[in-house]
Amino acid sequence: MMDPTDTSHPDYFHRVVDCQWACPAHTDVPQYIRLIAQGRFTDAYMVNRQSNVFPGILGRVCDRPCEPACRRGRVEDKAVAICRLKRVAADHREDISERLPKAPEQGNGKRVALIGAGCASLTVANDLAPLGYELHVFEALEKSGGLMRTNIPQFRLPPKVLDEEIDNILDMGVQVHYGARIDSMAELLDKHFDAVFVGTGAPKGKELKLPGRYDSDRIHIGIQWLESVAFEHTKTIGKQVLIIGVGNTAMDCCRTALRLGAENVKVMARKPRQFFKASDWELEDAEEENVDIVVNHSPKAFVVEDGVLKGMDFEVMTYELDDNGRIVESAVTGETMIPCDDIILAIGQENAFDWIERDIGFEFNEWDCPVVDEDTMMATREGVFFGGDAAFGPKNIIWGVAHGHAAAISIHRYLSGQDITDRPPRHLNLSAQKMGIHEWSYSNQYDASERRLMPHVGLKERFKQLDIEVELGFNEEQTLAEVERCLNCDIQTVFKAPACIECDACIDICPTSCLTITENGEAADLRTRLSAPAENMDQALYVSDALPQTARVMVKDEDLCVHCGLCAERCPTGAWDMLKSKVLQPYAGTVVAKPVTVKKAV
Amino acid sequence: MSTSKPKVRHPNLPRNKHGLTFRDYEGAVSTLCAGCGHDSVTGAIVQAAFELEIEPHGLAKMSGIGCSSKTPAYFLSASHGFNSVHGRMPSVTTGANAANRDLIYLGISGDGDSLSIGLGQFAHAIRRNLNMTYLIENNGVYGLTKGQFSASADLGSKAKKGEANQQPPIDPVSLAMSLGATFVARSFSGDKAQLVPLLKAALTHNGFALVDIISPCVTFNDHEGSTKSYRWSREHVHKVVHTDFVPPAGEITADYEAGAAIPVDMHDGSRVMLRKVDDDYDPTDRLAAIDFLQRHTAAGEVVTGLLYIDESKPDMHGVSGTTATPLRDLDYDALNPGADALAEIQLAWR
Ligand SMILES: Cc1cc2nc3c(=O)[nH]c(=O)nc-3n(C[C@H](O)[C@H](O)[C@H](O)COP(=O)(O)OP(=O)(O)OC[C@H]3O[C@@H](n4cnc5c(N)ncnc54)[C@H](O)[C@@H]3O)c2cc1C
Ligand SMILES: Cc1ncc(C[n+]2csc(CCOP(=O)(O)OP(=O)(O)O)c2C)c(N)n1
Ligand code: SF4
Ligand code: SF4
Ligand code: SF4
Ligand SMILES: [Mg+2]
């Protein structure tokens, strides 16, 4: 027998909002999509900024974990273009200067050092500056932004967008010391900062130690090469280029090479396509630019003759897969030499903490990285916090932001004498949405429109300069169609068992067969006895209290609910209602109010 | 604002042999009061038609007037339909069936439509053993005209404002049994597990199949003191037989103890397995069944299940010896042999 579902736990309804739950920073996606639908771009931008800090940046280059999670992708095959819509809000917002957080005139007298000026440190600064901290950022390079500036190419992320969103943070009086690489943690600690945040990323590109590696200067490490292009130290490349590896760095390398004059670029992958690490959209964009992606080629040796790079030897592979698509066997079926002028290694990044002394209180793990607590983000040395790629290895910007928020909470609690392991809770408010018998405050009708595609600058045009942004952003038609694809997963179906007369009206009307009234049972059994079998184990089953007339239970499979509100419209007794959930996410210094349920639609 | 049920559906719905999902057997969104029992009956019909793998164009929905009679708009939108005059659905169906015996006829009626204005037509359709399924969505009131007591209202049952019904009810089940109906069932709109197999059996029966379905009117007859409310019905239902429907060439998967189930072979090769819930009840013994029903009705019970079945009786066409070819498929000369042929027939009867 399943226990009745406890929907008062804030995570229950939060999980139903698949995108928001999947977003490391828990951005309130459906809310900002509705605001865009209403033309309230500035409000939509601010909803984003509160959680993800960099909406203009992320609206272009976010890794978008929300999209594979999006319910629409289960109901049909394509998710809502959440990331594209974020950019719409950023592109069309008005002046936000009045609405930005500000540092108080009087500081709180505490000094915090932030090492590295990447997205993680910047988020910590964003959260701590308004609380009166004196913030010192130490950045090795001459510019801020970290990999967002040095590695993400300008044709994906224009510097203007980067500058604007970073300045919105730094303008709160954050002091950035450029060209100030920290070479010794011990020395920095001697400077008596009240707390230290380490946001130094994972700055080391992985090596490929095969014969010939050091015999030519035309073999480059991807992330270093991209940085050197970004700072205009590298301006050309040979006609034929091989990229080794097929992750997102490889995608940026191959497209950058094309813009520096390469004519034939091959991305060499060891395994078949389904094992690629690159996001689908990055692969598509590279292939649109006629980059050749070659599968099943395992690098064997660099071919260098008389100090001149001639190409690379590869072993041609075949793989045998099991039913789950895992490789069970591999075999070499041949060898081949692929000629080229340059080779770029894009096979991953690593952390480098040679500048943290081993005898000053930091515990190191098996990968030679400081041990960091996943909740508090604090290292074993008290008062030193980590975030972004420096904390648990290379991730992405939105994880850096999420870490930054968590670390800021810890730093503020730590410096206010509060227990940092006592995390401020997340709450969830519910509010009524009913406006009339068949009228809701949201656009509840299912819109069958297909996902809109991002328009691109023409193939000829885009290669003229390195910094021509390829993606044009959604136009009005695309925006209007795409916003309606969002299923409003935050408008929750809320059930009151005592009111149900078991008339089946909700069950018959539900278009996606989510609802069932049946005898209670164990979850595994119950999942087979529903209007449609509930096969997606990642999605919760809601189970009600026993119903008054027959003691059966109302079961809802959350998986494919399209939040159309028809169950609530057809229910004669109001046992189902549609209430909007709002997740109250804690930030440094904010007091999270107690949860409330607002009974009247406004 | 919602006026329609979106086409979006669960991506893994089962499909039947025509490649259809149950959603393909739906109709327009109901305009009945939210929570009306009739809508659940609609849901059960959709399910039964899907499971029987009926080709939508091979079925005709017939009805009279009433909330119940409106419901054919809400299912099987790809089927034929005739919404006739109040109480006249049986005669229109008789005509249609006479002309095209190949269609499956599904009549939807109400207690008002069948037991008051249409009582005569109802009785004669039974007597002719017209090959049709006849559903009475029985709520004890005239729903469409705002809740007057109907002829099925129980003595003493209270109206919404409190006055008690003064006249004895007509029970369509007892009436049908006494008129010699060949398939008589009763069910409750709130029990699809019982209703769907009953509908499948009824739609497969060769002859007149009555299913009287207690179908609460949420707006005018679902209060304290009503004997047709959801609560009262649930509290007073007495299930006497359990029906399993086994499609043609279908395997009998349920485990029946020897003698515990009575198999009834239907003319299309399907089989209905009747399991007694109440040991005293035999759905093939008409006199005993009538006696049982009278006793239990007097005790205030609503007896449900497949109450009586007789697959051996000929239907209207069988009795009349009409041609196996539907009239609509006969050519003009066969249908109308001419004045001379008529004169000859008349002469034979002089
Ligand atoms: C080619 C490439 C493309 C990418 N594309 C995307 C993308 O499209 N979307 C996405 O979400 N993520 C992307 N990423 C990942 C993303 O850039 C990183 O996850 C993110 O930038 C990490 O942020 P961070 O603040 O932890 O560190 P970083 O951005 O790495 O910033 C660290 C900063 O610290 C400085 N620093 C390092 N050591 C010291 C020191 N000892 N003293 C002082 N300063 C120091 C560095 O100079 C740097 O400025 C990409 C990564 C690469 C390599
Ligand atoms: C010839 C005729 N007489 C009277 C009416 C008015 N009338 C419409 S529906 C109805 C009764 C319907 O009751 P029932 O068949 O039980 O249907 P319900 O609405 O309860 O489902 C009556 C009397 C009519 N439409 N036509
Ligand atoms: S449909 Fe909208 S609310 Fe639901 S997961 Fe997708 S983007 Fe989020
Ligand atoms: S809102 Fe209600 S009717 Fe609509 S899909 Fe969800 S459960 Fe079904
Ligand atoms: S429509 Fe309302 S009363 Fe009817 S079964 Fe659903 S929740 Fe219960
Ligand atoms: Mg009625």
Image (cartoon, coloured by chain):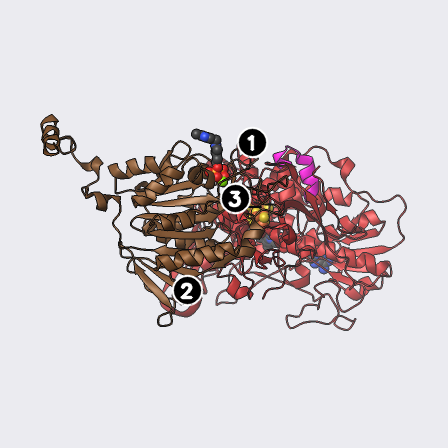
Q: Which one is nearer the viewer's eye here, A57 or A434? A: A434
Which marked residue is nearer to the observer: mark 1 or mark 3?
Answer: 3
Q: Ligand 3 within 8 A of label 1's CB? A: no
Q: Which chain is red?
A: A
Q: Please, what is the three-letter code of the amino acid marked with disc 3?
A: Ala
Colour for chain B in the figure: brown
Residue B134 in view in this figure = yes
Q: Residues within 10 Å of mark 1 (few under 14, many from 20)?
A: few
Residue at (37% x, 38% y) in the render? B120
Return the mark for residue B276.
Answer: 2
Cα–Cα gap, marks 2 and 3: 29 Å
Chain identifier of the residue bearing label 3 in the image: B
Query: Is residue A116 inside the magenta stretch?
Result: no
Identify the residue at the far top of this view.
Answer: B339
Q: Residues within 10 Å of mark 2 (few under 14, many from 20)?
A: some
Which marked residue is nearer to the observer: mark 2 or mark 3?
Answer: 3
Residue at (26% x, 47% y) in the render? B315
Cα–Cα gap, marks 1 and 2: 66 Å
Picture quarter with the C terminus of chain A: top right
Q: Which residues are magenta?
A: A35-48
Q: Which one is nearer the viewer's eye here, A235 or A581? A: A581
Q: Please, what is the three-letter code of the amino acid marked with disc 2?
A: Lys
Secondary structure mostly taken by the magenta-highlighted segment of the chain? helix
Q: Ligand 6 within 8 A of label 3's CB? A: no
Q: Secondary structure at mark 1?
A: helix
Residue at (56% x, 57% y) in the render? A539
